Image (cartoon, grey):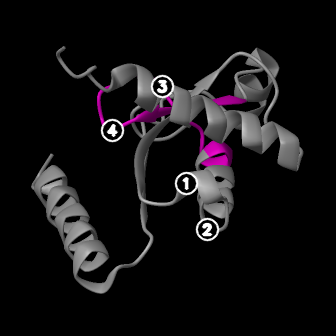
Amino acid sequence: FFGALDAKRAGETLIRDAQSRLSLETCIVRPKLHCYDSGPFGGLPQDAYDDMQYQAINLVPGDVVDGESSHPATAGVLMQALTHPLAANKEMCIVNSKGSAPSSAMAWDQVFGALQERERQMTPSPLR
């Protein structure tokens, strides 16, 4: 991808370094492939995307998921991540699924709560 992934990796490293050096709260948000967008490589127009009702938002820890995210979903997560306490010091991917977009504070609490639960499930248990 012409060095784009290397640049993203370097940028994320700078964010992590600043977080530890300056004791800042950070959040790294990774939108996945925007296949629903029309453009030079195909895709669908926004109204077709809306008709499919793939507006629900799933947040997955790290960078280990395949899927697609829309620009509106990415914008919504970025806005919420600025102030939501469960977004502090997290790294996440955004993936859309069938359903409605979160439209209330309680709905966003559920989205970020599900992220926290997925992180807990992915953390290995200590050996006894």
Q: Mark 4 or 3 closer to N-term?
A: 4
Q: Label for residue 118?
A: 3
Residue 61 colored magenta? yes
Q: Nearer the viewer, mark 1 or mark 2?
A: 1
Local secondary structure at mark 4: loop
Q: Mark 1 or 3 closer to N-term?
A: 1
Distance CA(mark 4)–CA(mark 1)? 13 Å
Distance CA(mark 4)–CA(mark 2)? 18 Å
Query: In the drawing, does residue 57 fall left or right of residue 23?
Result: right
On screen, residue 19 above or below 36: below
Magenta highlight range: 56-73
Local secondary structure at mark 2: loop
Residue 10: x percent and y percent? 14, 65
Query: In the drawing, does residue 14 fall left or right of residue 118?
Result: left
Q: Label for residue 82?
A: 2
- Asked whether disc 4 touches disc 2, contact meaning CB atoms under 8 Å apart, the reply is no
Residue 85 in sight: yes
Q: Mark 1 or 2 closer to N-term?
A: 2
Distance CA(mark 4)–CA(mark 3)? 10 Å
Local secondary structure at mark 3: helix
Q: Mark 4 or 2 closer to N-term?
A: 4
| Residue at point 31%, 74% (across, down) | 19
Q: Which residue is mark 4?
A: 62
